[in-house]
Image: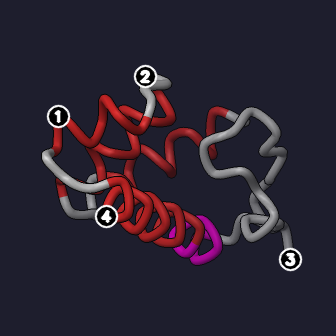
């Protein structure tokens, strides 16, 4: 993932609800398992799944709005993201 994409994700995370942000960081940055995150946030596994889905969608939307090509196919938190800003 490029440094520019990481910067955009960091900025976009500031604009999501705090519980979604915490869930995303614990899962994708700290690589914590679902059980641990659920315990910390005091939510069910189903609720955690919904939160992660929503935050990933929001991050994807933010990247696309900033002109990143392929944000839809990009693994938002994964290491396979190769998106670059659009040059059109």
What residue is at 35 percent from the left and 34 percent from the top? 35
Marks 3,4: beta carbons within 8 A: no
Q: How crowded is mark 4: few (under 14 residues within 10 Å), some or many (20 or more)?
A: few
Marks 3,2: beta carbons within 8 A: no
Give residue 30's mark: 2
- Residue 49's spot in the image, x, y percent? 44, 60
Q: Residues within 10 Å of mark 1 (few under 14, many from 20)?
A: few
Marks 3,1: beta carbons within 8 A: no
- Measured Cα–Cα span from mark 3 to mark 1: 44 Å
Which of labels 3 and 2 is toward the front?
A: 2
Marks 1,2: beta carbons within 8 A: no
- The residue indicated by pointer 4 is 47
Q: What stretch is highlighted in magenta?
A: 61-66
Q: Based on the picture, tell me whether residue 12 belongs to the magenta stretch.
A: no
Upstream in the sequence, badge 3 or badge 2? Answer: 2
Give residue 40's mark: 1
**Is 36 on the left-hand or right-hand side of 31?**
left
Q: Residues within 10 Å of mark 2 (few under 14, many from 20)?
A: few
- The residue indicated by pointer 3 is 88
Q: Nearer the viewer, residue 9 or 20?
A: 20
Where is the C terminus found, in terms of image quarters?
bottom right
Q: Residues within 10 Å of mark 3 (few under 14, many from 20)?
A: few
- The answer to whether 38 is drawn above or below residue 68 in the figure is above
- Measured Cα–Cα span from mark 2 to mark 4: 19 Å
- Measured Cα–Cα span from mark 1 to mark 4: 13 Å
Upstream in the sequence, badge 2 or badge 4? Answer: 2
- Residue 12's spot in the image, x, y percent? 39, 58
- Local SS, label 1: helix
């Amino acid at each position: 993932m490029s440094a520019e994409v990481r910067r955009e994700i960091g900025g976009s995370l500031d604009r999501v609800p705090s519980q979604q942000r915490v869930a995303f960081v614990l899962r994708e940055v700290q690589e914590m398992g679902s059980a641990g995150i659920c315990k910390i946030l005091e939510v069910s596994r189903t609720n955690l799944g919904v939160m992660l889905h929503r935050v990933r969608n929001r991050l994807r939307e933010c990247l696309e709005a900033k002109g990143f090509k392929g944000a839809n196919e990009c693994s938002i938190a994964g290491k396979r993201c190769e998106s670059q800003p659009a040059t059109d």
